[in-house]
Image (cartoon, coloured by chain):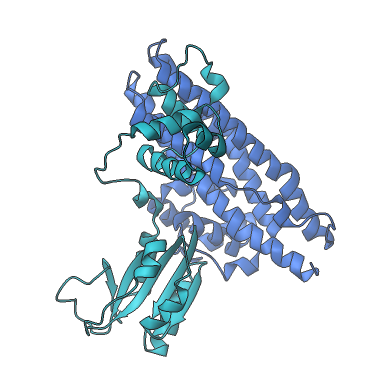
């Protein structure tokens, strides 16, 4: 498996995996990057290169776990990144899915039951996703930030008490895809439907990566801090 | 699902080398064993996603890994001490490595063993639900618990769970609301009397 290095040109990363584009945006990186390397860009934008590489490499390789880079950055950096990701979901991806589903429904026969059911299902999914993300924004992240900044344990909580399963939300997204791929009779515009499924699939991949960063990077780091403080 | 990697090789240098390569990449428990027989002490493992990298010995000794195979999802990677390709297909596994295999390739193989997308049913198994599975699905969609379903159908909870597992495998749909949509689309629920929006 390919692991990107500090000395790689950023343009090379994008050519290897264009799904990294929104990931770069979350770091505030804009295109027109000439022949700059990862190290150059990180210096310019004041990003820790270890953190940047950990994020792009876990995105690029599903099983990769950056054991060593993990020690080189702060949980606050991760939270800043995760918050950017949440913004990207709610300001761009979810409205795009809303819009495509609306267009898709409009392209089908109004009596058609299948897409109406999908609509109801999607609304429920969206509600759960929103709750899940709100929970992280309002409870989990502030807990971690407080722990890192004040070096004090909260007697009432540990990071484990906030732990929630991602799997249920992920399951629904996959179900949504399967319902359309397998069970809805295609009484709709095919090109809109393809766009819809491709957008869902990319979102699914992004969410998986997001969950991996939370579970495999943020969680263990926080537990380590708790242990150091004598939990 | 819990993941584990077993490395079985008689050479300590090779065991530790493989361990170093895999540890730098995967965040998974890695267990080093000298002999295959030692795998027996792990027979209580269940429901795990296991990759076993084992030293391939051409001694025709029986590979008795039954117990671990039955209760877990096991993938095998053979380690060939000789540099040549195997003359005949290896038992159990589709991947093999030799001392010359580059490290990234080994990491890639293990990754592929765990690739989730490959779990999507590719083969041509029948998707049709049995009459009993439809009964169970209908009650699931109406929001009943396993206990209530068992009582209504006069079957054990264990049987209900097993039906539900089969339904999910056949339809590819896991969540209750997803199954409800499926039931409505397939006319298993009468939507004249019930508002589908209340169910999903």
The number of numbered discs placed on residues in the rendered structure image is 0
Residue B188: image location, x then y, percent: 41, 23
Most foreground residue, A71 or B196: B196
Look at the image and tell me whether residue B102 can be seen: yes
In this rendering, the answer to whether B171 lies above or below A51 is above
Left or right: A149 as drawn, with respect to A58: right
User: Who's the residue at 64% across and 48% down the image?
Assistant: A164
| Chain with colour cyan in the figure | B
Look at the image and tell me whether residue A30 can be seen: no
Residue B2: image location, x then y, percent: 50, 61
Q: Quadrant of residue A69 in the image? A: bottom right
Left or right: B100 as drawn, with respect to B6: left
In this rendering, the answer to whether B197 lies above or below A152 is above
User: Who's the residue at 80% across and 70% down the image?
Assistant: A230
Residue A182: image location, x then y, percent: 34, 32
Residue A30: image location, x then y, percent: 54, 45
Left or right: A14 as drawn, with respect to A139: left
User: Who's the residue at 56% across and 38% down the image?
Assistant: B147
In the orientation shown, which residue stands out farthest toward the front? B154
In this rendering, the answer to whether A223 lies above or below B20 is above
Q: Quadrant of residue B99 in the image? A: bottom left
In the orientation shown, which residue stands out farthest toward the left? B87
Q: Colour of chain A?
A: blue
């Amino acid at each position: 498996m390919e692991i990107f290095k500090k000395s790689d040109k950023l343009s090379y990363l994008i050519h290897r995996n264009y799904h990294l584009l929104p990931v770069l945006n979350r770091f505030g990186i804009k295109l027109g990057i000439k022949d700059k390397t990862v190290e150059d860009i990180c210096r310019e934008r004041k990003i820790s290169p270890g953190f940047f590489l950990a994020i792009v490499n876990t995105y690029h390789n599903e099983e990769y776990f950056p054991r060593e880079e993990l020690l080189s950055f702060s949980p606050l950096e991760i939270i800043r990144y995760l918050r950017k990701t949440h913004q990207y979901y709610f300001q761009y991806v979810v409205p795009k899915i809303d819009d495509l589903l609306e267009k898709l429904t409009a392209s089908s026969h109004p009596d058609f039951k299948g897409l109406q059911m999908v609509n109801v299902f999607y609304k429920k999914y969206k509600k759960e996703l929103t709750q899940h993300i709100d929970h992280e924004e309002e409870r989990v992240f502030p807990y971690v930030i407080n722990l890192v900044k004040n070096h004090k344990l909260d007697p009432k909580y540990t990071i484990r008490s906030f732990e929630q399963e991602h799997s249920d939300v992920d399951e629904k997204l996959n179900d949504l895809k399967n319902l359309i791929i397998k069970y809805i009779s295609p009484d709709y515009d095919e090109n809109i439907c393809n766009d819809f499924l491709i957008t869902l699939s990319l979102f699914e991949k992004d969410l998986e990566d997001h969950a991996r960063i939370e579970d495999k990077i943020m969680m263990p780091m926080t537990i380590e801090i708790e242990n150091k403080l004598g939990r | 699902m819990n993941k584990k990697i077993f490395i079985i090789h008689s050479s300590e240098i090779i065991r530790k080398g493989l361990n170093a390569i895999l540890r730098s990449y995967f965040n998974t428990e890695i267990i080093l064993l000298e002999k295959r027989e030692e795998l027996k002490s792990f027979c209580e493992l269940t429901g795990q996603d296991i990759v076993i990298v084992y030293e391939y010995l051409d001694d025709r000794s029986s590979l008795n890994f039954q117990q671990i195979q039955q209760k877990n999802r096991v993938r095998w990677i053979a380690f060939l001490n000789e540099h040549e390709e195997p003359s005949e297909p290896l038992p159990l596994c589709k991947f093999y490595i030799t001392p010359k295999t580059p490290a990234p390739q080994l990491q890639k193989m293990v990754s592929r063993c765990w690739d989730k997308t490959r779990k999507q049913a590719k083969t041509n198994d029948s998707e049709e639900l049995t009459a009993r599975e439809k009964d169970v699905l209908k009650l699931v969609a109406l929001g009943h618990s396993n206990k209530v379903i068992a009582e209504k159908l006069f079957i054990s909870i264990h049987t209900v769970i097993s039906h539900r597992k089969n339904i999910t495998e056949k339809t590819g749909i896991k969540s209750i609301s997803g199954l409800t949509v499926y039931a409505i689309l397939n006319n298993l629920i009468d939507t004249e009397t019930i508002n589908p929006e209340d169910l999903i």
